[in-house]
Image (cartoon, helix red, strand yellow):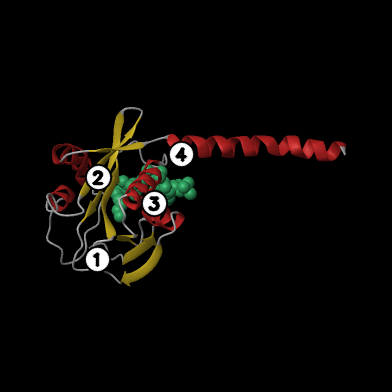
Amino acid sequence: MIKNELLKLETLPYFTTTLLHSITSENKNTLKKTNLKKAKEILDFAEKENAFVNSIGEDVQTIYEVVENFKDKKNFELYEIISENKTVGIISSFPNPKRFDDDVISIGAMYVLPGQKGKGFGKNALKLFLQKAKEKGFKKAFTKTWSTNKASNKILKFLGFQKIGRKEKDRVNGDDTIEYLLEL
Ligand SMILES: CC(C)(COP(=O)(O)OP(=O)(O)OC[C@H]1O[C@@H](n2cnc3c(N)ncnc32)[C@H](O)[C@@H]1OP(=O)(O)O)[C@@H](O)C(=O)NCCC(=O)NCCS
């Protein structure tokens, strides 16, 4: 009896930490609609970090130029990721009419600023973005990443995305491109 009570006490800190983590990570950031000027400010950091890996044969463009190409197009959305009133990153979607029907949202550039990575902002931002897409009536979400991108592959798997395609050695660094789809 006494042993069992002690066991309960020992496991309490673990549950408390896990609970606190889930509460804080649920509430740690929000999304705010933003504009191209702010997107450039944020994505210039990505450029300096070489944060994105292009596909072979793609036009050589900065990540900001890629995003800018989609302005004024259907299903283009641009959000700043905000934590404690500070900008910590950006997330966007883009039109993909050749590949999908109108009820599929395609997630484009997602980026968390230097010094802010690895704090759960990316994962939570994508979760919030998908909730908004669902509320707007989208039925599925598509996205793609490169094979050695541990953070994004982990986030996509965690959120339930299924792998639907793989293009081998498709990226300029020799990585494969992995395509993902999620039922919303
Ligand atoms: C991808 C990116 C947006 C993720 O945002 P983030 O806020 O850094 O990621 P999170 O803190 O939400 O981490 C999500 C998970 O990935 C893991 N992770 C984060 N960075 C990692 C890394 N460098 N290596 C391994 N795992 C990593 C975290 O541990 C976390 O896993 P957990 O939930 O099991 O603890 C961010 O790293 C980034 O801006 N990368 C450069 C641009 C990019 O790759 N964009 C996506 C292209 S498709």
Which residue is located at x 17 percent, y 55 percent? 74
41 relative position to 107: left or right = left
Task: Name the residue that disc number 3 marks.
Answer: 151
48 relative position to 60: left or right = right
Which residue is located at x 36 percent, y 44 percent? 125
Decide if ligand 1 comes within 8 Å of the CB at mark 3: yes
Disc with the residue nearer the chain's start (3 vs 1): 1
Decide if ligand 1 comes within 8 Å of the CB at mark 2: yes
For discs 4 and 3, the disc positioned in front in the rendered view: 4
Quadrant holding the C terminus: bottom left
Q: Position of residue 47 (x, y in %)?
A: 20, 46
For discs 2 and 4, the disc positioned in front in the rendered view: 4
Q: For marks 4 and 3, give the CA distance.
A: 18 Å
Q: For marks 2 and 1, give the CA distance.
A: 34 Å
Task: Name the residue that disc number 1 marks.
Answer: 101
107 over 111 or under it: above or below: below
SS type, badge 1 = loop
Q: Position of residue 58 (x, y in %)?
A: 15, 63
Q: Which mark is residue 49?
A: 2
SS type, badge 2 = helix
For discs 4 and 1, the disc positioned in front in the rendered view: 1
What's the residue type where badge 1 is placed? Answer: Asp
What's the residue type where badge 2 is placed? Answer: Glu
Q: For marks 2 and 4, give the CA distance.
A: 28 Å
Task: Name the residue that disc number 4 marks.
Answer: 26
134 relative position to 72: left or right = right
Using the image as rendered, state which of residue 88 and residue 54 is in the foreground: 88
Do tag 4 and tag 3 residues touch (Cβ < 8 Å)?
no
Disc with the residue nearer the chain's start (4 vs 3): 4
